[in-house]
Each structure stands twice: as structure tokens, then as C-alpha cells.
């Protein structure tokens, strides 16, 4: 079993839809959770960073962590075609970047 | 703007030649940088951790003699793919953590290597 599981998609939604992207994990020691957006042929860009459980909101993006279920989510409200990208979750038990584990990424397509 | 710069973004070379990719942190010093390889529709695979002033730490299965890493300064790490072969064709990405923190990890734009 992989430490981090993420549905590769693709997930195709119409413009304006609410998108839900998810990751599950097996290591209960994970406490630091990140979401990255990666456009085609580009490096990943940090979107959200959450420590421990709870919600965090930034504009149209909301990150949610449920440690009891070992499940994290990224919600995108009012999705736009420019949101079309691959979204990678990442997590770590350590505050230090050398222990980061990435999901495989979910490809999102938002069509006009 | 970008805080980690990676060059070149794209390189095509002949089999047997060596290719150097540079990764620079632009507005912070990074004693550690990371090099990844990414295959289509797959996640980032950590290849090695580049350490300023000391040898790089390679992940299991990564040939250190093939993928030479040099962390020449606090803002520059280089990855050299030596004697490249077509199977080395891939997307290589570097990252640098500001303050060493997982929540402050910034990625370069990536370098697509094609070996003919």
C-alpha cells in the first residue's frame, strides 16, 4: 500500500462548478499537509499549507484535513478554465522538507 | 514571481553526451535542495538531496555516478546527467525549501530532457 493515495483522474467539470480533490494516507504521523498545482510542463506551485486537522481557506480554495480518517481534501469554488492543471497533495510527519511524500496528482479539466 | 529558477527548461542531446541542469534559489539561501524526476502521469520521484558543502544524498536505485549533483553555493545546485541515454529522457524538477521548512518548499520550472 502506498503511503499516499490520490485518484489520477482526469476530473472534468464545467466552469463554475465546485471541485473536490482528495488524498488518503496511511501514516498517522503525518501532520503537515500541502496542496500543489502543476500546469503542464511546469514545476509545481504551492497552493495551500495546513498543519494538523481543520480547514484553511484562501480565496476560492479550501483545504480540509481529517486526521481521524486519514483524508485530506482541496475544494475549489467557482472553478475556472485556468484551474485546469494537475493537483498534487503532499504530506509529512516532519516540519522539514526532506521528508515530504507526494501523491501521484489528479488531473483537473475545467471546460467553459 | 519565481523564487526558484531552473535552466534550461528544455534540452535535446545526443546519446552519450552529458547535460547540466541548474537550480537557483533567487531570494533566499538554501543549504538543501531536492532533485526530482517525473514521468508522464506519475508523481514526483525524489532522486537526491543536494547539500551545500557536502555530498549529495541519493535515493535508493538512483545511480550517483550517472546523476552528478554539485551544490556549489547557498543559492545554486546543479544536476549533471552523464553519458545520457534515451531512457534518461524525462522531466527533471528541482526544489528548495526556504528555511528548510516543508511548508516553504518552492519548485523550479522543470527541465525536459530528450536524449536522441
Image: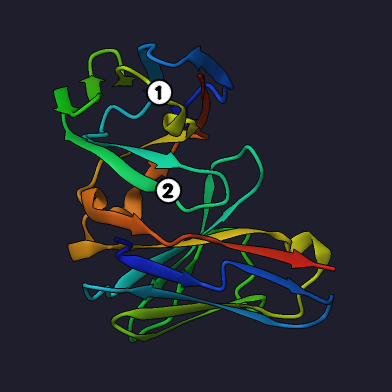
- Residue B95's place in the image compared with B18, above or below, is above
- The residue pinned by badge 1 equals A23
- The residue pinned by badge 2 equals A44
Task: Tell me the colour scheme of the image.
Answer: rainbow
Please state which of the two labelled residues, at mark 2 or mark 1, is closer to the viewer. 2
Query: Which of these two is toward me, A71 or A19?
Result: A19
Mark yes or no: residue B7 visible. Answer: yes
Image spot of residue B44 (x, y percent): 52, 47
Query: Which of these two is toward me, B66 or B30?
Result: B30
Classify mark 1: helix, strand or loop. Answer: strand
Q: Are marks 2 and 1 in contact (CB under 8 Å)?
A: no
Image spot of residue B7 (x, y percent): 51, 73
Q: Are marks 2 and 1 on the same chain?
A: yes
Classify mark 2: helix, strand or loop. Answer: loop
Label 1 Cα neighbours within 10 Å, binned few <14 / some 14-19 / many ≥20:
many
Q: Is residue A92 left or right of residue B40?
A: left
Q: Is residue B19 left or right of residue B21?
A: right
The numbered dot on residue A99 is none
Question: Label 1: chain?
Answer: A
Image spot of residue B46 (x, y percent): 50, 55
Image point (36%, 47%), residue name: A45
- Residue A111's place in the image compared with A59, above or below, is above
Query: In the rendered structure, which disc, 2 or 1, sits on the residue that comes first in sequence?
Result: 1
Amino acid at each position: 500500500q502506498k503511503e499516499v493515495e490520490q485518484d489520477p483522474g482526469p476530473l472534468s467539470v464545467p466552469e463554475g462548478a465546485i471541485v473536490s480533490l482528495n488524498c488518503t494516507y496511511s501514516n498517522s504521523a503525518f501532520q503537515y499537509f500541502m496542496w500543489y498545482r502543476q500546469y503542464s510542463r511546469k514545476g509545481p506551485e504551492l497552493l495551500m499549507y495546513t498543519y494538523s486537522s481543520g480547514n484553511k481557506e484562501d480565496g476560492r480554495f479550501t483545504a480540509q484535513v481529517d486526521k481521524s480518517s486519514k483524508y485530506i481534501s482541496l475544494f475549489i469554488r467557482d472553478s475556472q478554465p485556468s484551474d485546469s492543471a494537475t493537483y498534487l497533495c503532499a504530506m509529512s510527519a516532519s516540519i522539514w522538507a526532506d521528508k515530504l511524500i507526494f501523491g501521484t496528482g489528479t488531473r483537473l479539466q475545467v471546460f467553459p | 514571481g519565481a523564487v526558484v529558477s531552473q535552466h534550461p527548461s528544455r534540452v535535446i542531446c545526443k546519446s552519450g553526451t552529458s547535460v547540466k541542469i541548474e537550480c537557483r534559489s533567487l531570494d533566499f539561501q538554501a543549504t538543501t535542495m531536492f532533485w526530482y524526476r517525473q514521468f508522464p502521469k506519475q508523481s514526483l520521484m525524489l532522486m537526491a538531496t543536494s547539500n551545500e558543502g557536502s555530498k549529495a544524498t541519493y535515493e535508493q536505485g538512483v545511480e550517483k555516478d550517472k546523476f552528478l549533483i554539485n551544490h556549489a553555493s547557498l543559492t545554486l545546485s546543479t544536476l549533471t546527467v552523464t553519458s545520457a541515454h534515451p531512457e534518461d529522457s524525462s522531466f527533471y524538477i528541482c526544489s528548495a525549501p526556504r528555511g528548510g521548512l516543508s511548508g516553504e518548499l518552492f519548485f523550479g520550472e522543470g527541465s525536459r530532457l530528450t536524449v536522441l
